[in-house]
Image (cartoon, rainbow, N blue to C red):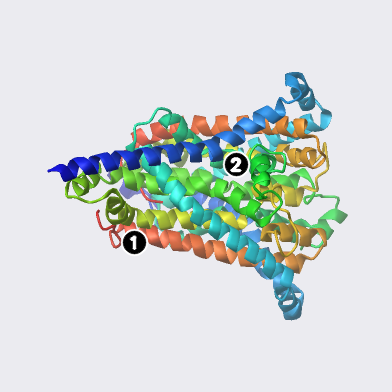
């Protein structure tokens, strides 16, 4: 204690050493790697004047690309919800052979580099692919269409749903499901009245994360998407196209829209999580 | 009394429907893709797969990926530890904003993460022209690839360390301080040993992300084979050049590297979890 009193530091400053050093190096790091480039992103659209900015924002190809990205990401996340909830349920409740392998495989889309995912899905669903060829005979083409984008984003988004729902399901006592069954609830009722309401906040979280990831996704999509303007061209790809045309304002305005939407999405998820953590939102059963 | 029995049977049927559905989902979505990668790589036999990897451009791509990964992991881990320490142990104004800035790169599209560097260092960027005249090349050069990778892998170390460090509180650090320990001594001997599994987990996550990054690197790289092509970019070049075997061989190697890193991480993650019992929300 005596030692602490002997320090010459002002009382307002935290006595734990290293504050200034840690602060300066963190600010330097954040400033150079994140704040500086993002400042350029925010400033650049205005550099050529308001006219160039409004011109860039009236580009119909840009709107088409943003629509393709948003709609595909939304559909993919939506389809992933039931698939992810089923996977999470089986992982938590059913003691299956190969459960550990399945558990490891869930994270595969996180682990595999996007370029590898891209060429793999394009080959798998391509006209001669293992899944593409039989589907083509049924008259369904996936690769090189907008459907391909949804398929790729489904792969990328699946772990978000499973990993959001899984911990909640694990905390949900199985007795609850059994009790509902003993009270005469039909399986369907158990699912819709007991299990799903408890999982709802986690599912929305997973959906939000998958959607936010989906709208920005590039590597896993461009190989399987047809990349045709207005039809199967995603917004990140249009950024690359605009950059190759040296149209920096055009590229920047798309980037800006993507940034705003995905930030809003993740802010929404964070808000939801905080409320759940505080117990303001609970499932009916919890 | 028969109703519960009937329900139990019903439950069992729906249970099996769910289990079979799970196997189908896992099979189609998660098992087929990696199997396809390996089979496509070995289509012309293991020798062809191996030979494609000894191509000079392939070797250059592997080397560049390793260099970029090591460099960005070293930089982001060092600063990531300091940032986590700062945010976990001290209370200061704008702390929330700083944390938000650190986490921001996660929500940004990889292509945008590349674009921002072109806005600074591209030919039409703020400083690109001036630096070019001084013969400093950042865009379409390894320096740009490093910056893009740093941006993309920015938050991971801080993010994995922070919950643990916050949970640890400051008692041990304060005690060490009272005993006269310096900043480095506290960080090295008090804080980090407790957090080592979480740190390792964050470092491995950074590693996996760094070597697999495609979009951001693709925008700033310029795709010069042998010079600015990392493994993911080289995979794209090979695939678009209809060199399927070579593309999938490289993809196999990259996927194995990334997955080995990630599975190593889950080992450490479980240890980290044992150290810090209980839940923490992000």
Q: Is residue A221 visible?
A: yes
* x then y, percent, for residue A64: 68, 67
Image coordinates of residue A195 in percent, x first then y, are 30, 51
Residue corresponding to mark 1: A275
Q: Residue most toward the left?
A: B1
Subunit of label 1: A
Name the residue furthest bottom. A51
Q: Horizontal placement of B35 versus A285: left or right?
A: right
What's the chain of the residue with tag 2?
B
Q: Is A206 left or right of B277, judged from the image as shown?
A: right
Helix, strand or loop at mark 2: helix
Q: CA distance from mark 2 to mark 1?
A: 30 Å
Q: Secondary structure at mark 1?
A: helix
Residues A230 and B247: in front is: A230
Quadrant for the N terminus of chain A in the image: top left
B205 over A231 or under it: above or below: above
Residue visible at 39% across and 61% down in the picture: A272
Across and down, in percent, residue A235 comes to 67, 61
Q: Are marks 2 and 1 in contact (CB under 8 Å)?
A: no
Relative to the observer, which residue lies in front, A108 or B276? A108
Lateral position of residue A257 relative to residue A284, left or right: right
Label 2 CA crowd tier, 10 Å (few <14, some 14–19, many 20+): many
Q: Residue B209 has which mark?
A: 2
Residue A226: % across, % down: 73, 54
Compared across the picture, whether A110 is left or right of A2 comes to: right
Residue at 77% in and 29% down? B59
| Few, some or many residues within 10 Å of mark 1 (<14, 14–19, 20+) | some
Above or below for A247 versus B190: below
**Residue B104 shows up from this direction:** no
Q: For the point 42% across and 58% down, which residue is it?
A: A204
Residue for point 34% across, 33% down: B274
**Mark 2 vs mark 1: same chain?**
no
């Amino acid at each position: 204690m005596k030692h602490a009193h002997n320090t010459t530091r002002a009382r307002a400053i935290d006595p734990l050493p290293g504050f200034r050093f840690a602060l300066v190096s963190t600010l330097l790091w954040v400033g150079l790697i994140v704040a500086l480039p993002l400042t350029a992103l925010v400033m650049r659209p205005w550099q050529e004047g308001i006219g160039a900015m409004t011109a860039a924002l009236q580009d119909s190809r840009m709107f088409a690309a943003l629509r393709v990205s948003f709609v595909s990401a939304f559909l993919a996340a939506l389809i992933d919800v039931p698939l992810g909830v089923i996977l999470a349920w089986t992982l938590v409740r059913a003691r299956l052979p190969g459960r550990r392998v399945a558990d490891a495989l869930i994270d595969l889309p996180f682990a595999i580099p996007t370029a590898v995912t891209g060429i793999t899905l394009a080959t798998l669903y391509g006209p001669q692919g293992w899944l593409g060829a039989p589907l083509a005979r049924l008259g369904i083409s996936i690769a090189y269409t907008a459907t391909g984008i949804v398929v790729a984003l489904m792969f990328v988004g699946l772990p978000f749903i499973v990993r959001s729902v899984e911990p909640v399901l694990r905390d949900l006592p199985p007795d609850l499901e059994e009790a509902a069954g003993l009270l005469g609830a039909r399986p369907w009722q158990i699912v819709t009245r007991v299990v799903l309401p408890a999982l709802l906040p986690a599912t929305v979280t997973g959906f939000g994360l998958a959607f936010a990831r989906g709208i920005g996704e590039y590597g896993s999509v461009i190989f399987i998407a047809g990349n045709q303007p207005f039809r199967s061209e995603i917004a990140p790809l249009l950024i690359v196209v605009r950059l190759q045309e040296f149209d920096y304002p055009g590229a920047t305005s798309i980037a800006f829209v993507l940034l705003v939407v995905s930030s809003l999405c993740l802010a929404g998820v964070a808000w939801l999580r905080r409320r759940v953590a505080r117990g303001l939102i609970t499932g009916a059963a919890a | 009394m028969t109703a519960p029995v009937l329900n139990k049977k019903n439950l069992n049927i729906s249970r099996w429907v769910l289990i079979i559905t799970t196997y189908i989902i896992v099979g189609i979505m998660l098992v087929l893709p990696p199997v396809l990668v390996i089979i496509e790589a070995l289509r012309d036999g293991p020798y062809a797969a191996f030979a494609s990897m000894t191509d000079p451009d392939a070797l250059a791509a592997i080397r560049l990926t390793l260099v970029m990964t090591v460099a960005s992991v070293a930089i982001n881990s060092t600063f990531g530890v300091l940032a986590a320490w700062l945010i976990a142990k001290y209370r200061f104004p704008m702390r929330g904003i700083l944390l938000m800035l650190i986490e921001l790169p996660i929500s940004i599209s990889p292509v945008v993460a590349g674009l921002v560097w072109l806005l600074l260092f591209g030919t039409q960027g703020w400083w690109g022209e001036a630096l070019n005249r001084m013969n400093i090349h950042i865009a379409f050069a390894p320096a740009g690839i490093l910056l893009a990778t740093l941006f993309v892998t920015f938050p991971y170390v801080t993010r994995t360390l922070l919950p643990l460090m916050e949970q640890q509180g400051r008692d041990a650090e304060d005690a060490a301080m009272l005993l006269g320990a310096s900043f480095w001594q506290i960080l090295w001997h008090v804080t980090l040993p407790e957090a080592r599994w979480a740190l390792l987990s964050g470092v491995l996550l950074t590693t996996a992300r760094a070597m697999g990054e495609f979009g951001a690197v693709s925008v700033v790289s310029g795709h010069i084979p042998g010079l600015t092509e990392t493994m993911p970019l080289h995979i794209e070049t090979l695939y678009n050049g209809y060199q399927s075997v070579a593309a999938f061989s490289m993809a196999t190697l990259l996927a194995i590297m990334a997955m080995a890193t990630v599975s190593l991480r889950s080992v450490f993650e479980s240890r980290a979890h044992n150290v810090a019992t209980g839940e923490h929300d992000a």
